[in-house]
Amino acid sequence: MEEVYSDVRLLQRDLNTLEHMIYVSCKFTRTTEMLYKVMEQMVSTYENFFGIAYQVLLRENSSFSDSTNKIQMLTRVLIERGVVTDLSEYYLLKKLLISEFETMGEYRRNLSIIAFIEGEEYVINIPKLLDFYENLKRAITSLTQEQY
């Protein structure tokens, strides 16, 4: 059980790192590289969250067979527990990290990354990253409040 507490503390540390990267690093450097690093850190934090949530929630739930997809199981259990997480944001971030993008407003207040994925335009800027961060924070907080 101590290992789970440690993992949850690491999730909180990941959230603190993300918050600092967005509110301080991005706002002061205003570079595409920093936006990209925030997206990478966010994907990493999502993956840590999924791993810890799977370990915490499904270790006690043996009603699932091994053939069931782990993501489907985790999503179902998270919904049952009232933990809200948006997997579409996670998948969007992963797609953005491997796609080609254009930069608009480098070193300016309106810094944005513009990417085209499957013919659709996505604009990622600091306010959009803050939205992603708040959703991830809400999911992690609801998981930790539920369990501890």
Image: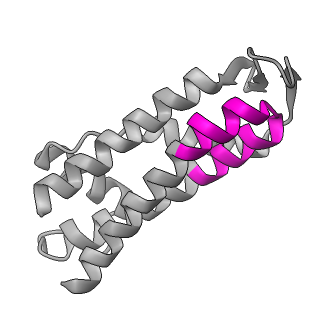
Q: Report whether 110 appears left or right of 129.
A: right
Instruction: State which quarter of the image contains the N terminus.
Output: bottom left
> Where residue 120 sits: x, y (%)?
70, 18
Residue 103: quarter of image: top right
Looking at the image, residue 111 lies above or below residue 22: above
Residue at (57, 31) in percent of width and height = 129
Display coloring:
one colour
Residue at (28, 73) in percent of width and height = 55
Residue 117: quarter of image: top right
Near-viewer residue (141 or 92): 141
Residue 23 magenta-highlighted: yes
Looking at the image, residue 146 lies above or below residue 94: below
> Where residue 140 sits: x, y (%)?
31, 51
Residue lying farthest to the bottom in this orientation: 2
Q: Report whether 65 appears left or right of 118.
A: left
Q: Can residue 49 be seen in this view?
A: no
Residue at (56, 21) in percent of width and height = 127
Looking at the image, residue 49 lies above or below residue 132: below
> Where residue 123 sits: x, y (%)?
69, 19
Instruction: State which quarter of the image contains the C terminus.
Output: bottom left
Residue at (26, 39) in percent of width and height = 84
> Where residue 110 sits: x, y (%)?
74, 14
Q: What stretch is highlighted in magenta?
A: 20-41
The dominant secondary structure in magenta is: helix
Image label count: 0
Q: Report whether 128 appears left or right of 65.
A: right
Q: Is residue 110 visible?
A: yes
Residue 129 magenta-highlighted: no
Near-viewer residue (37 or 27): 27
Near-viewer residue (26 or 36): 26
